[in-house]
């Protein structure tokens, strides 16, 4: 087993990431908490070209591990560090029920919160654009002159505005996205007033999932940053805490015990996940099953899964919304279900009580006829 050595001469983990990138924040927060030697590089660094070759596509975050292995995917980066024995503070709670909760919030944070993240970044140009524009260029083409910078930002922001639309952020949904986010922000604020991290004294996968949208977009872009600072001080403090290598919880005066992870404020967050995200997961698993029926199984298994395999329409907060279908979400959902399936009967009973109280029981039943697996830094359909 490798050991943690952050001293001089230690081979750093090289993290290819950008300050403004959603999934970069998840990997970065985790790596910082491990107090590992990390060297962050932007994708505009000429050394990123070899990474794109190795990974097979342009995507961040990518971690180049001390042994040279390239790991793409924020979740896979966390797992690679844990598997190498380099974790100082494991992202996986020791308590098996808490572990399932952590995985639920990993899924919800990284995938269920992309609508507010994209809306508050791309639909408030007067406040955001100067900041995001230079921030993107610093990552994509550091040192670019004004003309080149404009072209680089035009291309990348065009892609991202289209991505926002693929997540269902359209003028018809703006009001619902805002109402949903403000409600969530209030629930998170109430929760983080009582404890430093989602499940108590230390961060877990749940925190790392949530920091993805709540760092680069919702706390850092000027417009949503002002909303968070004026409305949700405790969430703002949690974001600061999540970007620090320390526990950074002075206001909790050294307390380490927070009782059951299932406090009332956490139950309210679970109920929010049920209200806000469960309908999309239900529609997604049904859509994928119907789609799998129309595909040749042998062909499906022969190549990595495309990021989005189609578009589906479902009812979200009382209105029809059309979004891409992303099998990666199924992969994260399977992680929740696998952890739940591994529980003892007593533990399962405790989890079921929590989930049914929140209206979230169906989450454990939403399965498709073919699973998604990850290998070679990509998603694949599991063999039939
Ligand atoms: N599941 C991946 C998603 C990574 C991802 O989507 N990264 C974005 C930036 S935050 C990206 O590189 N997109 C490529 C592009 O838009 O061309 C992870 O968790 O690392």
Image: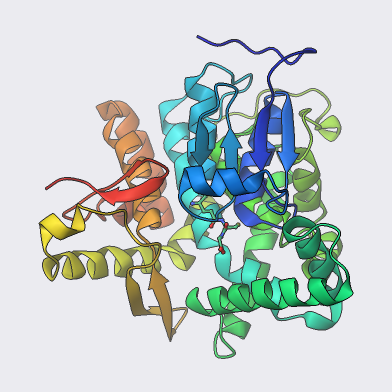
Position of 384 compared to 301: left or right? left
Which residue is located at x 78 percent, y 12 percent?
7
Image quadrant of ligand 1 equals bottom right
Which is more toward the observer, 292 or 145? 145
Q: Which residue lies most toward the bottom here?
A: 172
Q: Position of residue 221 (x, y in %)?
A: 79, 65
Decide: is 105 above or below 132: above
How many numbered badges does the structure rendering display? 0
Q: Give the colouring mode of the picture.
A: rainbow
Position of 11 compared to 65: left or right? right
Q: Position of residue 19 (x, y in %)?
A: 75, 52
Decide: is 292 above or below 163: above
Which residue is located at x 47 percent, y 22 percent?
83
Answer yes or no: is residue 61 visible: no
Q: Position of residue 212 (x, y in %)?
A: 63, 52
Q: Quadrant of residue 39?
A: top right
Which is more toward the observer, 339 or 81? 81
Q: Quadrant of residue 281?
A: bottom left
Which is more toward the observer, 301 or 288? 301
Q: Position of residue 302 (x, y in %)?
A: 21, 53
Q: Quadrant of residue 260?
A: top right
Which residue is located at x 35 percent, y 35 percent?
339
Answer yes or no: is residue 288 visible: yes
Decide: is 166 above or below 48: below
């Amino acid at each position: 087993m490798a050991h943690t050595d952050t001293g001089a001469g230690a081979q750093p983990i090289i993290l290819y990431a950008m300050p403004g990138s959603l999934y970069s924040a998840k990997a970065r927060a985790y790596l910082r908490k491990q107090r590992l030697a990390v060297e962050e590089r932007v994708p505009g660094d000429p050394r990123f070209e070899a990474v794109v070759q190795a990974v097979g596509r342009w995507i961040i975050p990518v971690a180049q591990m001390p042994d040279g292995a390239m790991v793409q995917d924020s979740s896979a980066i966390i797992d690679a560090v844990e598997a190498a024995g380099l974790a100082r503070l494991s992202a996986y709670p020791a308590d098996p029920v808490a572990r399932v909760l952590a995985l639920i919030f990993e899924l919800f944070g990284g995938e269920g919160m992309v609508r507010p993240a994209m809306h508050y970044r791309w639909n408030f140009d007067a406040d955001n654009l100067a900041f995001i524009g230079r921030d993107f260029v610093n990552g994509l083409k550091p040192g670019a002159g004004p003309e080149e910078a404009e072209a680089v930002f035009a291309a990348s922001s065009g892609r991202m505005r289209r991505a926002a639309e693929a997540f269902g952020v359209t003028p018809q949904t703006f009001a619902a996205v805002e109402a949903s986010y403000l409600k969530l922000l209030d629930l998170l604020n109430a929760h983080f007033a009582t404890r430093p991290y989602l499940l108590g004294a230390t961060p877990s996968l749940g925190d790392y999932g949530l920091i993805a949208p709540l760092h680069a977009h919702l706390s850092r872009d000027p417009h949503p940053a002002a909303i968070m600072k004026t409305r949700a001080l405790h969430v703002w403090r949690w974001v600061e805490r999540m970007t620090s290598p320390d526990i950074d919880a002075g206001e909790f005066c050294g307390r380490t015990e927070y009782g059951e992870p299932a406090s009332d404020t956490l139950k309210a967050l679970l109920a929010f996940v049920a209200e806000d995200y469960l309908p999309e997961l239900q529609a997604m698993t049904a859509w994928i099953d119907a789609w799998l029926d129309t595909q040749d199984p042998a062909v499906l298994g022969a190549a990595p899964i495309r990021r989005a395999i189609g578009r589906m329409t479902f009812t979200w907060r009382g209105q029809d919304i059309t979004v891409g279908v992303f099998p990666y979400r199924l992969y994260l959902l399977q992680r929740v279900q696998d952890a739940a399936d591994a529980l003892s009967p007593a533990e399962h009973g405790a989890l079921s009580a929590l989930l049914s109280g929140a209206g979230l029981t169906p989450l454990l039943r939403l399965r498709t006829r073919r699973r998604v697996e990850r290998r070679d830094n990509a998603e694949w359909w599991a063999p039939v």
